Image (cartoon, rainbow, N blue to C red):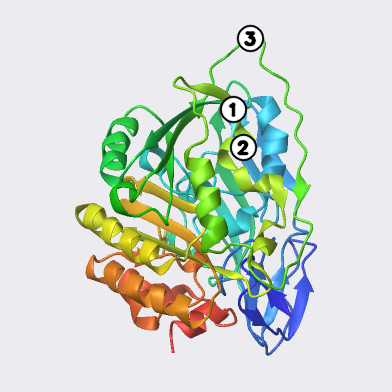
């Protein structure tokens, strides 16, 4: 039995094969392949029911690193955390990073992950300079924006379906130290969020907002806006002693419910905030949940869903307002409610999710039919706004919703390896 990070769905696989050597070819088998990194994807995009999973985590070698230019080449199973452990002491940093450092480089490319700086840096694939793709017939395609570009753009955001990424090369960005300057601002409504965001995006490279998904009435859409930048050269930086905790329980039911959520959200919204930017180590700024290992257990054994959408700029304000009302009225949702804008830098991938607009992401405990009804209502709002859902965070979107969200899907099928598939791909192409 294999699970995604959300613990839903639970699917049986024919076989799990651990890969140790990037030079080896794939085995001959009747089963469909699907690469599987560190298991931090959501939904069924990382699952392959009745097929074979290719575990890539042991492809964890660094191949080359030029400290002068920040160009790094490594195998696809290397974690972002392992990259940071290597390069931050040498004053380099990832150009784009999602909300966890426990994903593999191959997974970051296959899902073309985005971060808090999309408005000025685009998505992860924009900073990949080269990669090698191993096809099931033994063909190895080394590709970039100048060589085999069609394979390159199909593999970025290609959900692991074009073949196995064996290694990749990425361009890092320079930093002075491991610290960030972070500004926190409370906003009382979505109207105020838009005002703060418009001003902050011109000044700060990293921006994101948490909002209270259960707030209603005059306080609907209240939240806290975070903006950050890498700290300059600074003397006498504080010492940081970090220690991860592990969520100790595996409860049979979700600990996130309307009562606990209202209390947590109220406490978080009213927490004291400094008026001036403060120094923060990069880990709690970029990866606040990584300090609590196995946090997905909070939602109980039935697991949870993440609903992430992007709405185009012209429809974003009204669409997000309508979605917030629906979510608050349902009494569902979680503390993890994220609102941020995507910039105009186009993604390289044929199937990349991030595009110009506003993205909303929330986690929901799996409450069965009532959760599905809410999602269907949210889908209608997203569809009417010509928005899109994120495949890498999905476990239930319809085939029609997927095809409307990704107009290049038919062209993308030309690049799918005939021996590669996933539960997600089969579900949205019935």
Against 58, is 124 above or below?
above
Q: Which residue is mark 1?
A: 280
Using the rendered image of the protein, determine whether residue 143 is visible from the camera's viewpoint. Answer: no
Of the numbered discs 1 and 3, the one sitting upstream in the chain is 3
Q: Give the number of the disc on residue 284.
A: 2
Against 203, is 358 above or below?
below
User: What is the C-alpha distance between the residues marked 3 and 2?
Assistant: 21 Å
Q: Secondary structure at mark 2?
A: helix
Q: Give the number of the disc on residue 235.
A: 3
Query: Residue 103 appears at what percent x and percent y?
Result: 64, 54
Q: Residue at x 40, y 35 (%)?
A: 186
User: What is the C-alpha distance between the residues marked 1 and 3?
Assistant: 15 Å
Q: Residue at x 71, y 83 (%)?
A: 13
Query: Residue 303 appears at what percent x and percent y?
Result: 62, 71
Q: Are marks 2 and 1 in contact (CB under 8 Å)?
A: yes
Marks 1 and 3: which is nearer the front? 1
Query: Residue 209 appears at what percent x and percent y?
Result: 42, 43
Q: Residue at x 47, y 75 (%)?
A: 371
Quadrant (top left, top right, bottom left, bottom right) of the C terminus: bottom left
Query: Residue 199 appears at what percent x and percent y?
Result: 29, 31
- Circle 1 residues within 10 Å: few <14, some 14–19, many ≥20: some
- Residue 182 placement, left or right of 352: right
- Residue 391 placement, left or right of 252: left
Against 76, is 218 above or below?
above
Q: Secondary structure at mark 3?
A: loop
User: What is the C-alpha distance between the residues marked 2 and 1?
Assistant: 7 Å
Determine which quarter of the picture holds residue 49: bottom right
């Amino acid at each position: 039995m294999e699970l995604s990070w959300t613990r839903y769905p639970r699917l049986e696989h024919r076989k799990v094969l651990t890969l140790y050597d990037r030079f080896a070819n794939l085995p001959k088998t009747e089963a469909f392949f699907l690469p599987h990194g560190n298991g931090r994807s959501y939904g069924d995009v990382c699952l392959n029911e009745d097929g074979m999973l290719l575990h890539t985590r042991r492809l964890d070698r660094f191949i080359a690193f030029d400290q002068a230019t920040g160009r790094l080449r490594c195998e696809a199973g290397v974690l972002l955390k392992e990259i940071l452990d290597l390069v931050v002491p040498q004053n380099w940093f990832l150009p784009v990073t999602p909300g966890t450092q426990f994903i593999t480089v191959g997974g970051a490319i296959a899902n073309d992950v985005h971060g808090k700086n999309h408005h000025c840096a685009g998505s992860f694939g924009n900073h990949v300079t080269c990669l090698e793709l191993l096809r099931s017939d033994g063909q190895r395609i080394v590709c970039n924006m100048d060589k085999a570009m069609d394979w390159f753009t199909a593999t970025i955001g290609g959900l692991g379906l074009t073949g196995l990424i064996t290694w990749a090369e990425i361009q890092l960005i320079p930093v002075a130290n491991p610290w960030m300057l972070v500004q926190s601002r409370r906003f009382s409504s979505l109207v105020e969020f838009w005002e703060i965001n418009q001003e902050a995006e011109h000044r700060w490279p990293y921006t994101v907002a948490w909002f209270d998904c259960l707030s209603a009435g005059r306080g609907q859409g209240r939240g806290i806006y975070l903006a950050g930048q890498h700290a300059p050269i600074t003397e006498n930086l504080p010492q940081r002693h970090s220690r991860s905790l592990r969520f100790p329980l595996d409860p049979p039911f979700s600990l996130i419910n309307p009562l606990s959520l209202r209390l947590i959200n109220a406490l978080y919204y009213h927490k004291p905030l400094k008026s001036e930017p403060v120094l923060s180590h990069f880990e709690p700024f970029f990866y606040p949940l990584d300090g609590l290992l196995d946090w997905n257990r909070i939602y109980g054994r039935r697991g949870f869903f993440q609903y992430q959408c992007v709405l185009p700029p012209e429809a974003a304000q009204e669409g997000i307002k309508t979605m917030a009302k629906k979510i608050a009225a349902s009494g569902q949702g979680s503390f993890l409610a994220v609102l941020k804008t995507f910039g105009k830098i186009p993604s390289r991938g044929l199937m990349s999710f991030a595009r110009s607009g506003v993205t909303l992401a929330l986690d929901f405990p799996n409450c069965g039919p009532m959760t599905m009804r809410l999602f269907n209502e949210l889908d209608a709002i997203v569809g009417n706004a010509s928005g899109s859902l994120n495949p890498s965070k999905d476990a239930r979107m319809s085939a029609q919703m997927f095809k409307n969200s990704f107009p290049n899907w038919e062209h993308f099928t030309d690049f799918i390896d005939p021996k590669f598939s996933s539960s997600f791909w089969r579900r949205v192409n019935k």
